[in-house]
Amino acid sequence: MSRSWGFAMTAPAPAGCRRESCANTIPTALAAERLCLDHFLDEAFLRTDHMLTRCREGKAMSPGDVEWLLADALAVVKNLEEGAGDPNPDQRDRMLELLLILANLHEYVAHHSVQLHRPA
């Protein structure tokens, strides 16, 4: 049992997805997002694509952008762990693809002069 949430890590969160007309359950790792795994992955792919575009254009990334991408990676890893016993092949493939894209973004940032914008 997770002490902070009060339910097992493999149990879905006690609410449905916040997206209108979506009846999918929320995995424990996404309880704070209030999104089912499919909708979380949709949003994470959009955020990652946006950051890749910004990097290629030489635009600065904010510390919040970096934290958001790291949080996405952590959520994916937690969901992979939770679903290890009975994975949905399509969701598993999407999660692994997102992790690969996040790793590529990390490498891109490490090898290029991507600025990290820090507000004054």
Image (cartoon, helix red, strand yellow):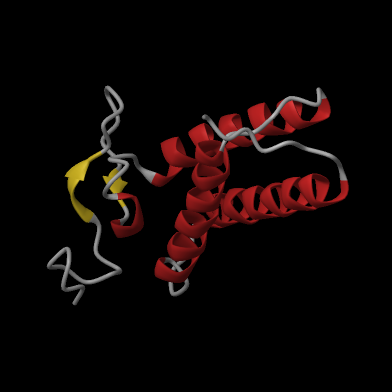
Q: Please state, as top left, top right, bottom left or bottom right, where the N terminus lies in the image.
A: bottom left
Q: Residue furthest right?
A: 111
Left or right: 12, with 111 as reference point: left
Quarter of the figure with residue 28? bottom left
* Quarter of the figure with residue 50: top right
- Percent x, y of residue 106: 73, 51
Image coordinates of residue 65 in percent, x first then y, are 55, 37
* Numbered label tally: 0
Q: Residue at x 78, y 37 (%)?
A: 114
Q: Position of residue 107 (x, y in %)?
A: 80, 52
Front-most of residues 82 and 88 = 82
- Left or right: 84, with 94 as reference point: left
Q: Nearer the viewer, residue 99 or 51?
A: 51
Q: Residue at x 32, y 42 (%)?
A: 33
Rendered view: 36 above or below 96: above
Taking 29 as reference, is 70 left or right?
A: right
- The extreme front residue here reads 120
Taking the spot 51% from the left edge, 46% from the top edge, the residue there is 67
Q: Residue at x 45, y 55 (%)?
A: 75
